[in-house]
Amino acid sequence: MITLQDIRVWDNVDYARFQNEIIPLNQPAIIRSVVSDWPTVVAAKKSPEAAVDYLKPFDTNAVIPALVGTPDIKGRFFYSEDLTDINFQRAEVTLTIGLERLLAIRDSQKPHAIALQAIQLSQVLPGYKALHPQPLLDTSAEPTMWVGNQATVAPHYDIHDNLACVVAGRRKFTLFPPEQINNLYPGPTLSAPAGVPVSMVDMKDPDFKRYPKYKDALQAGFEGTLEPGDVVFIPALWWHGVESLDTFNILVNYWWGGSHQGSLSPNDSLLHSMLSIANLDKTKREAWRHFFNYYVFKTTDNPSEHLPPKLKDVVTELSPEQEIKVRNFLAEKLK
């Protein structure tokens, strides 16, 4: 089996060092013991029950998303066999009910896979953020919590930079740079388990006959295991697979950056381009490549350098009124 590179480990990192030394590298980084003094981490190191007892008083009983898989999926949340659906069920529960259920099945030999997903802490656990400050980011960064038992999330990407903090249980991260997309065999988009395509390759048991280029991805890949209190920085668009190694796991993460204009998402632009350009003949796709390189990726000249500096336009900078018009134009075209 191919040995992956170790994710670089950093110690004694403060806000300035993270912002000025780590983020500019645009490489994954494990930072030890950043949140070891968080009350939930301290409680979780005593026992899962202690962590649950700490969290329950914060709970507003707001409904949160839950994923539930039968024992036969072995914790691998994935596509259905025919790739048209998912291999688990979606449900809604309160955090307290979800936590208690996870504790109840901890000792089961063949447990259901349970994942409490994308818990918005400002709504579900108000007061939690104030007691769990994130020293590496601005206070405007909002935390999201993920809770579950032993499970595997296939390599996928986020459009934002991501700082993931391990609160309870150990987690193994496997990361691949964006350019490895061709070697990761992304699955379909519309039936993706979490909204973006995930790698078709089973990280724990890769089928190299079916997915031979995955060996090349592994050559470029990184891995590392985090203990409670550790954090990992995952740059935007880096593919990351996650294995929750213990029977009770909590992770809190922060997303930031990744999009420039409000709610406009590069991923939405990608989907639009796939619909409008991907099925053109090769000569037309190549012609459009020049336009994208010029206007979007700016791989040659600055497309606005020959225009008046104060001109307001898509090529330069839109005024608020122009941005509304462009958004409305695009919305009308998509009807």
Image: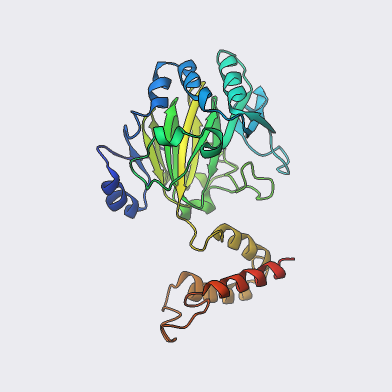
Residue projecting furthest to the left: 12
User: Along the line of sight, which residue is nearer the eye, 275 or 187?
Assistant: 275
Point out the image quarter for the C terminus. bottom right
Q: Could you tell me which residue is drawn at 57 percent across and 71 percent down?
A: 323
Image quadrant assignment for residue 129? top left
Q: Can residue 239 be seen in this view?
A: yes
User: Along the line of sight, which residue is nearer the eye, 179 or 257?
Assistant: 257
Question: Residue 316: where, in percent of width, then height?
Answer: 47, 77
Image quadrant assignment for residue 69? top right
Image quadrant assignment for residue 13? top left
Q: Can residue 1 be seen in this view?
A: no
Position of 162 relative to 226 (above/below): below
Question: Residue 85: where, in percent of width, then height?
Answer: 72, 41
Point out the image quarter for the N terminus. top left
Position of 125 relative to 49 (above/below): below
265 relative to 170 in the view: left or right: right
